[in-house]
Image (cartoon, rainbow, N blue to C red):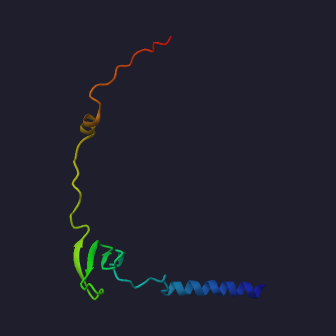
Amino acid sequence: MARKFFYVCAGMLMLALSYHFGATTATAQAPSNPVVATFPNGWVAVTANGDVYQATDANGPQGWHLVNNVFSTGPTPALHESWGQLKSRYAPQSAPVLQAPTNK
């Protein structure tokens, strides 16, 4: 029983020492802008930052050239208005008059 406890303690010590001396989690060395989408024909690719690339050769993707960027149009313009302006635009023009029930 003492031997098993010693092995567990030694294993935890080795794990703590390896972490202390620089062992970290494994990370991939992937490019910073990976391809996230392709179209069914395979001649158009979209990268993570929105760049759209098209193959230069119709017989096979020998090279790629930048066509456009999906996010190049800028932000969508929005109308700045107050709650009062919004309510007056969508509120009914005249409220219905409530009447007493007549089925007494």
Q: Is residue 83 above or below residue 97?
A: below
Q: Position of residue 74 (x, y in %)?
A: 21, 63
Q: Position of residue 40 (x, y in %)?
A: 36, 75
Q: Is residue 94 above or below residue 39?
A: above
Q: Going by the image, does 45 lie left or right of 11? A: left
Q: Quadrant for residue 84, please give it.
A: top left
Question: What residue occupies the far front of the structure in this picture?
Answer: 59
User: Which residue is drawn at the image coordinates 35% and 19% (left, top)?
Assistant: 97
Q: Quadrant for residue 53, please give it.
A: bottom left
Question: What residue occupies the far top of the structure in this picture?
Answer: 104
Q: Is residue 66 above or below residue 90?
A: below
Choose between 26 and 34: the one closer to the eye: 34
Q: Position of residue 32 (x, y in %)?
A: 33, 80
Choose between 22 and 50: the one closer to the eye: 50
User: Which residue is drawn at the image coordinates 25% and 34% (left, top)?
Assistant: 88
Choose between 60 and 104: the one closer to the eye: 60
Question: What residue occupies the far right of the structure in this picture?
Answer: 1
User: Which residue is drawn at the image coordinates 23% and 57% (left, top)?
Assistant: 76
Q: Quadrant of the N terminus?
A: bottom right
Q: Quadrant for residue 83, please give it.
A: top left
Q: Going by the image, does 27 lie left or right of 72? A: right
Q: How many marks?
A: 0
Q: Going by the image, does 3 lie left or right of 32? A: right
Q: Position of residue 69 (x, y in %)?
A: 24, 71
User: Which residue is drawn at the image coordinates 49% and 13% (left, top)?
Assistant: 103
Q: Is residue 89 above or below residue 3?
A: above
